[in-house]
Image (cartoon, rainbow, N blue to C red):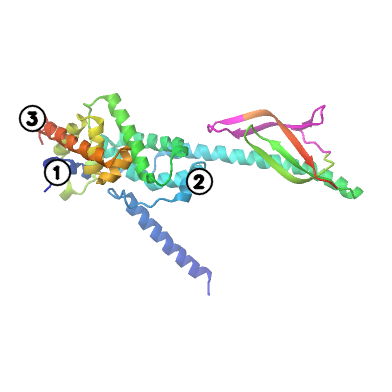
Amino acid sequence: MIGRVEAELARLRALRWTGPDRNERVEQFLRERLHMENRKHRSKATTALLLAAVFGGGAVAGGVTHHFVTRSVTIVVSETEAMELEGVPDGAQFIPPNFYIDENGDMHTTGMSYVDENGQEQVEDLYFIDVIESEGE
Amino acid sequence: MWNLAAARRIWSGMDGLRLAMERRAREGGAWALTPDHAGLIERARSEPAAFGELYRAHYVAIAGYILRRVGDAHLAEDLAAETFLDAWRGMGRYRHGPVPFRHWLLRIATNRVNRWARRHGRRREIGLVSELDAASPPDRPALEDIRAVMAALSRLSMRHQSVLCLHHVEGLSVEQAALVLGCSPGTVKSRLHRAREAMRRELDRPEVKP
């Protein structure tokens, strides 16, 4: 037998959600997150293209002299994140405007953005590009 | 032999099945029927698009639960948004398996509602008109009756409100309510007993008698 309290509470079941199926605040939040993710990926892709252009020039030069040296290049994006390009030909010599090589021979790039672990977009002025090893001729 | 037309027919049949499942999951009282997708939940920890799929699958059910707790559609919409934003922030802590995803969302929603109720006191205006207008007439209880029940409920402690709503309004079993509330089924049973007594006393008060 259903008690009185149960019967009274059952009346509340008449309250049905008849509002929209979507919540604009949540949708907006997710759109912003997606936008940030896309920017992050685009930024990485742009860097990879630039490096391909840099080292592609080297590949042409190497081909002319029949002297190929490949190596892998690590781009340090943040303290916890890095990109690695394998088989990059040695002899890169065309440096795009936002890349430069310092007096120690280390390569840097500027103005990259990424999303940190708290979901905040960060723009760093300077990234060190670490050429980690030579793999031979 | 496979061809494009056959593939389209199969795809549209699967789409129909998916839509039927979604509709069923959106209906109130379907808490136990919603399947969990472990892969989707894993991806939702870091991918907004995957989290968006989860949010769309559970939004109506969660908003409905909050509406039945607070009695106001606009407030329910706000609290549902906060529930899903909390869920996004807490995805890293969610462990798939022991607690089904929707029950985890119910836990967050319950905490949100309780926090809001503590801040705004137990006596509050309850706006039900627009929600009741949508209910079908034969099933529609008198507005005054619902308002009286909600008013009596709102004077109980948060623990008692939560356990009564989850069990007697949402239709969760004692075990399911225990998962949502993060306690043992035995605790839910004893809390239910005390909550029903408290609710009976509130309903007997002359000013809230339906």
Alpha carbons under labels 3 and 1: distance apart = 18 Å
Of B115 and B131, the residue lying toward us = B115
- Residue B124, relative to residue B167: is it above or below? above
Alpha carbons under labels 3 and 2: distance apart = 53 Å
Same subunit, labels 1 and 2: the answer reads no
Residue A71 pos. (x, y %): 79, 44
Residue drawn at 44 percent across, 36 percent down: B90
Of B145 and A102, the residue lying toward us = A102
Relative to B149, B105 lies left or right: right
Relative to A47, A35 lies left or right: left
Q: Nearer the viewer, mark 3 or mark 2?
A: 2
Residue matched to label 3: B206
Chain for numbered disc 3: B
Number of the label disc, if any, that sits on residue B43? 2
Q: Is residue A21 visible?
A: no
| Residue ranking furthest to the right | A65
Q: Nearer the viewer, mark 3 or mark 1?
A: 1
- Amino acid type at circle 3 is Pro
Label 1 secondary element: helix
Which of the 4 image quadrants contains residue B208?
top left
- Residue B21, relative to residue B168: is it above or below? below
Relative to B98, A60 lies left or right: right
Residue matched to label 1: A7
> How packed is label 1: few (under 14 Cα within 10 Å), some, or many (20 or more)?
few
* Mark 3 or mark 2: whose residue is earlier in sequence: 2
> How packed is label 2: few (under 14 Cα within 10 Å), some, or many (20 or more)?
few
Give the residues in magenta. Answer: A93-122
Residue drawn at 19 percent across, 33 percent down: B153
> How packed is label 3: few (under 14 Cα within 10 Å), some, or many (20 or more)?
few
Same subunit, labels 3 and 1: the answer reads no
Chain for numbered disc 1: A
* Quadrant where the C terminus of chain B is found in the figure: top left
